[in-house]
Image (spheres, coloured by chain):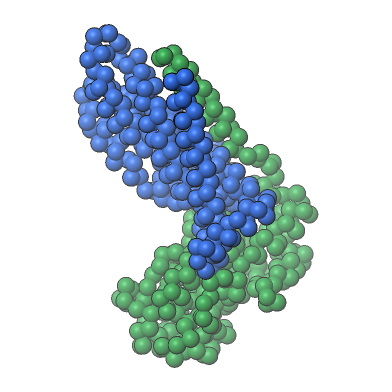
Amino acid sequence: MDLGHAIIGAFGLVLSGDPDLTEIIGLSLSVTLSAVIAACVIGLPLGAAVGAFRFPGRTVCAVILNAFMGLPPVVVGLVVYLMLSASGPLGVLGLLYTPTAMVIAQTILVTPIVAALTRQVVEDLNAEYAEQFASLGVSPLARAGALLWDGRYSLLTVALAGFGRAIAEVGAVIIVGGNINHVTRVMTTTIALETSKGNLELALALGVVLLTIALIVNAMVMAVRALAARAAYA
Amino acid sequence: MIRRHFMALAAAGALALGLAGTAVTAQAEDFIVVQSTTSTQNSGLFDHILPIFTEKTGIEVRVVAVGTGQAIKNAANGDGDVLFVHAKPAEEKFVADGDGVERFDVMYNDFVIVGPPADPAGVAGSSDVVDALGKIAEAEAPFASRGDDSGTHKAELALWKEAGVDVSSASGGWYRETGSGMGATLNTGTAMGAYIMTDRATWISFGNKGDYQIAVEGDPKMFNQYGIMLVNPEKHPNVKADLGQTFVDWVISPEGQEAIAAYKVDGQALFFPNAQAD
């Protein structure tokens, strides 16, 4: 049992076109991408606001955002479980053990990453543009927007950092999703399950598949970035 | 430029909502959630019996497989329609607390103690578990415990008590609590040459046995009974009582019992049905 076998095993798994595996990969991607997009919708404006605006407690906000990048997934999973549990405050929604619950948990994990890194990007750019903004009398809202737009390539990497956290995460999704076959089973929970069955080779092969998916997503984003950059100069 | 930015943001927002929408896979109308234990899932029993049930009734069964302790807590929160675990005293308390309706015996198998071929405590071949545990403690041979309040963990602690060994004082020494599921504990325990108590079903279907063998088996004290019960709809109104009861009734029916008996790994039956026919 070594990495070479696992890589061969991974190819075998992918080439077999196993419908269960396709379903699991599909769910992994849809849950993670939904969470990353939701985290960007919340985190980009939040990070830009903390990075570009002056207000009391701004440093405290930045420290909190940075600290929350280290949120333990199991704790987030537990809190979301307690909220969505039938005896919890949001139990009536019936979201526990659904992919939506997994998206919620991952959004909570990823948002601080997006917000904290965005704040840094925007703050650095803001320092660079400060005089220009002042001379043009740009409104704060427009300023935040302009900084986000000009930092878009760095922010793409920020989104990828969030994607990396979410796609690799198992602690939160296994609690709120329950790892239910054909409903909430994703790549990471499958790997955990196969490891617990002692099927280490299969687990490792699935790990290679997961890594490959992450590689493809990153390559695609980088390709889009390169195309966009070229178009901008054309 | 700025307008473009806001357009992009709006588009991203719309996309997020759309994706979140598609992430909620088509919810089948007729499904139940069963809070169960890792041994039934990891052994492959559910993969064998659930399709038979679903084909007959059209009811989809969604299994959350965790340790018995956690399964009971989840069910007591109302997060499940049926509880299917193996810790009879805890199950009876669950019913007595009003969280469950009526508990039924379903099936049994037994616990075994697996150990390394070197057998440092000299217990291989024993069928007296209390004596064997005493020897392990005396030899201070490594013993890996689940340590997770699961059915297996509860059973193991009861046997230690009977052997008169205070394992809590040895914790961190020769007695090692992994705080994990059966499979994870087997992975950890076999890697450190420890004795491990496991249910036979998980052991037979476990894929990473290495050179480990069953050291202690056949003691009636290692009997492992599984029970099933509907979560009480009077206490937890969200429980799908009709669908859940259909599943409970089927599992203890002759047909369900036959399906359990028919499940074999390497020619060995893993669970022995023993529901009381009414």
**Which shade is chain A?**
blue
Would you identify the image quadrant in which residue B160 lies?
bottom left
Q: How many marks?
A: 0
The residue located at (36%, 76%) in the rendering is: B175
Image coordinates of residue B196 in percent, x first then y, are 46, 77
Quick one: which residue is furthest to the front in this view?
Answer: A234
Q: Quadrant of the N terminus of chain B?
A: top left
The front one of B63 and A23 is: A23
Image coordinates of residue A62 in percent, x first then y, are 26, 33
The residue located at (26%, 27%) in the rendering is: A124
Q: Is residue A103 above or below residue B11?
A: below
Which chain wears green?
Answer: B
Q: Is residue A2 above or below residue B193?
A: above
Q: Quadrant of the C terminus of chain B?
A: bottom right
Image coordinates of residue A24 in percent, x first then y, are 60, 48
Asked if residue B269 shows in the view, the reply is no
The residue located at (47%, 83%) in the rendering is: B116
Q: Is residue B277 left or right of residue B91?
A: right
Image coordinates of residue A26 in percent, x first then y, are 60, 43
Q: Is residue A220 above or below residue B117?
A: above
The front one of B184 and A208 is: A208
The residue located at (49%, 34%) in the rendering is: A223
Asked if residue B45 shows in the view, the reply is yes
The front one of A213 and A39 is: A213
